[in-house]
Image: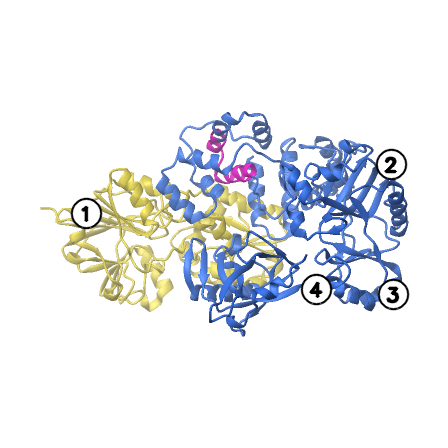
Amino acid sequence: MQAFATLLDALAYMPSRNGKLRLIADYLDHTPDPDRGYGLAALTGDLSFTAAKAGMIKELVATRVDPALFGWSYDFVGDLAETVALIWPAPPGVNHPPPGLAAVVEGLSTAKRGSIPALLSGWLDSLDATGRWALLKLITGGLRIGVSARMAKTALVEWAHARGVEASVEQVEELWHGLSPPYAPLFGWLDGTGQKPDVADTGGFRPMMLAHPLEENDIQSLDPADYRAEWKWDGIRVQLVARGTADQARIYSRTGDEIAGTFPDVAAQMGFHAVLDGELLVAREGRVAPFNDLQQRLNRKRVTAPMLRDFPAWVRLYDMLFDGGEDLRALPFDDRRRRLEEWFTRTRPPGMDLSPLVAFTDWDHLAHLRLSARDTVVEDGAIEGLMLKRGDSPYIGGRPKGPWFKWKRGPLTADCVLMYAQRGHGKRSSFYSDYTFGAWRGTPGADGELVPVGKAYSGFTDAELVEIDRWVRNHTTNRFGPVREVAPGLVFEVAFDSVHRSTRHKSGIAMRFPRIARLRWDKPAAEADRLEVLERMVAT
Amino acid sequence: MIPAPDSWVTPCPPDRGGGLWVEPGGFHVDPTRPVERAVITHGHSDHARPGHARVLATPGTLSIMRARLGDGAGLTQQPLPYHQPIQIGEVMVRFVPAGHVLGSAQVVMEWRGSRVVVSGDYKRRFDPTCPPFEPVPCDAFITEATFGLPVFRHPPVEGEIARLLHTLSVFPERTIVVGCYALGKCQRLIAELRRAGYDNPLYLHGAHLPLCALYQEQGVDLGDLRPATVADAASMRGGIVLAPPSAMADKWLRRMPDPLPAYASGWMRVRARARQHGVELPLIVSDHADWDELCQTVTDVSPGELWVTHGSEEALVHWATTQGVTAKPLHLIGRGEEE
């Protein structure tokens, strides 16, 4: 546990990707099995604990620490796990060694709920402050160290390379779902002492092929005849792994999370035998609903009948990786597309359709189609932009540069007025960096009032952040903990992908992907946009 | 009748000199503005200000003040070694080691049977560059509380030095630039690195050179030190450079090959603080007492009253009160939280 804590601590402060990879490889190099496997699983997000929650940790610390001292400390530190880790008073005479990571993981998964507080206290007593912090972050599930699952696997592969074992991230990703922590066979292969694990028939995830964003300059060097265009639908990318019966169906998200349990309506239609790539959407009578509707279905542990009825899931298919047991990934896109169409005609699975190819003559024509996507025959709000795929491209896991591009639709914008600013986290914790902004309802200056329409914390430079922070401090009219209310005076040009109805917001609308496009120091607040302007943009 | 401590030692408003005013002695302790007669606990700039007429301090502190303030160190400078009493006005004064930095002292003052001790800044752990803190029983103990919250428990310095050296081994092509205070922290880090067996040359920012030379003159062995400004960049690769914290955001840093920013301070214990400084390697090394040391000191000194200044006064006052010690916050203006 202490070695893992040292790793998390170093990762949390390391801004560079290469530095992070180096730190993870160093950990794998110096940590024995099974700890290193559990450490890797913690980084990839494959460990989860449900038994210990923030409330239990608060109760535990209350048995050891004066509440007034805890209160002042929590105010100062601002993070519960960190405060508890730092303030936890180790009783004198503790002489048992700190637990290994494997002991923690196995202990938590086998312990009865009632015995967890005592187990946790014993561990906290024997760890140092960094060890306690890592333990509490691990069990409450909020590592926030800027390491993605893919980065952790990349580090694993680089570590293997240093030991003379040739392996790729895609190979590891393909094996991943057929293995479980602490991944002994995987480490056996990668440290050169064992064979590559054979997990061919586990219904595993195949790394998805991803696209690079298209830069305006790129397009001039591309030959339109080489590329096929499709709409980029605004849902979530999924991989359907079907092996003949619905109860064997697997649905993977882009990051390889298995979500069939959340979408039983889709899984129920997967009685065929194929691996397909598509977009998960909510659709009614073949018409795609706004992303907001899909949001109602995401991340639900329990799926209710009304949810299935009101937000029916739909899959729009892009590609075919396996037809039965036949691996199509090495075939060119055009051939896979033909196989997909033939298969679809043959199978006609309910709740699915094909994403149509968009015919175009040249880039200008396609650019015109992209710009008009918002108000053409295509469902408004269902399109994020266009995908360009080379007709001869094989299906390669990862993000190879060249064969696939995404060409996003230009954003919508509105001029909004800053209303509230909240202090940020991490290196921004001394800056007011999270902004809630509003639009006018009624006439500014007369009966008009600002109503909040969105929140953003990106799109500005560090230098602009310093300026906004200073402005916020000088124009504060009210404080609520870390939040300051400011006088109307600073106008942001806000960019966003779409606007949706929302009953949770006073304004009745919510923005998707809002970010600050420009600071309008020049614009008087009274000239900012009215709510009606945003209401007219609502995707229906 | 023995006078109450607050009848003769009082916080002084800045416009009358600041710091503490000792009426029967006619002197200030650590005044923030120029005064006629100043007793100085140690050489940090929020305690040792320029422009006093007469200055009483330990020989170590006076040499530091001369190095930093030149002519501003005081028109008349009177060195007073540890443990030697001297009478100023009606007050007997002596210095006792505070363990903070070279020359740092507590001021022990006695008047008509009443004893007040001003701790200045202090710590309780081993420091190879200065003698350790000695508790002195008294009627009123004036303590700092820079790290006066129970979240501040500085880890053993050996572990922090080990982390620094391990980072060097993981990133041998980078240069670790450690931000640290020019007085005290810099020399202690160097001495601890030497104690851990690191005897490669250490590179110093220009601002750190004079005080390191002074420490060496005072008999503290710091090993092979070289100015970073004239060193060839390639020779610093895989090495350690010490610089003032302010230099870390400066163009100066660009001369280092692939610098890895570190910062040695007790504040590094709190992650948000460390991130604010853009640090990749926070080292929790402090020359101030941590929470446990503050509490231990109150217990050891066992004062009639505890006065708490600069830091989180409220928490230490609260704790002392629960221990049956009469305690109050003392708001002194102009003391930084810098370390």
Q: Which chain is yellow?
A: B
Q: Mark 4 points at which residue?
A: A410
Nearer to us: label 4 or label 1? 4
The residue identified by callout 1 is: B115
Q: Which amino acid does label 2 sit on?
A: Gly
Separation of residues labelled 4 and 3 (CA atoms)? 21 Å
Mark 4 or 2, which is nearer the eye?
4
Which element is circle 2 on? loop
Tag 1 subunit: B
Q: Residue A382: where, in percent of width, then height?
A: 72, 55
Q: What stretch is highlighted in magenta?
A: A121-140
User: In the rendered view of the protein, which quadrant contains the C terminus of chain A?
Assistant: bottom right
On the image, the x and y values in percent for residue B259 come to 58, 57
Query: Which residue is label 2 attached to?
Result: A325
Q: Where residue A210 sits: x, y (%)?
A: 76, 51
> In this figure, which residue is indicated by the disc labeled 3?
A361
Crowding at dot 1, Cα within 10 Å, few <14 / some 14-19 / many 20+, comes out as many
Q: What element carries label 3?
A: loop
**Which residue type does callout 1 highlight?**
Arg
Query: Subunit of mark 4?
Result: A
Q: Which amino acid does label 3 sit on?
A: Thr
User: Are the residues under badges 4 and 2 in a single subunit?
Assistant: yes
Calculate the distance from the C-alpha at mark 1 to the C-alpha at mark 3: 95 Å
Q: Nearer the viewer, residue B16 or A530?
A: A530
Query: Which shade is chain A?
Result: blue
Q: In which quarter of the image is residue A172?
A: top right
The reply to the same-chain question for discs 4 and 3 is yes
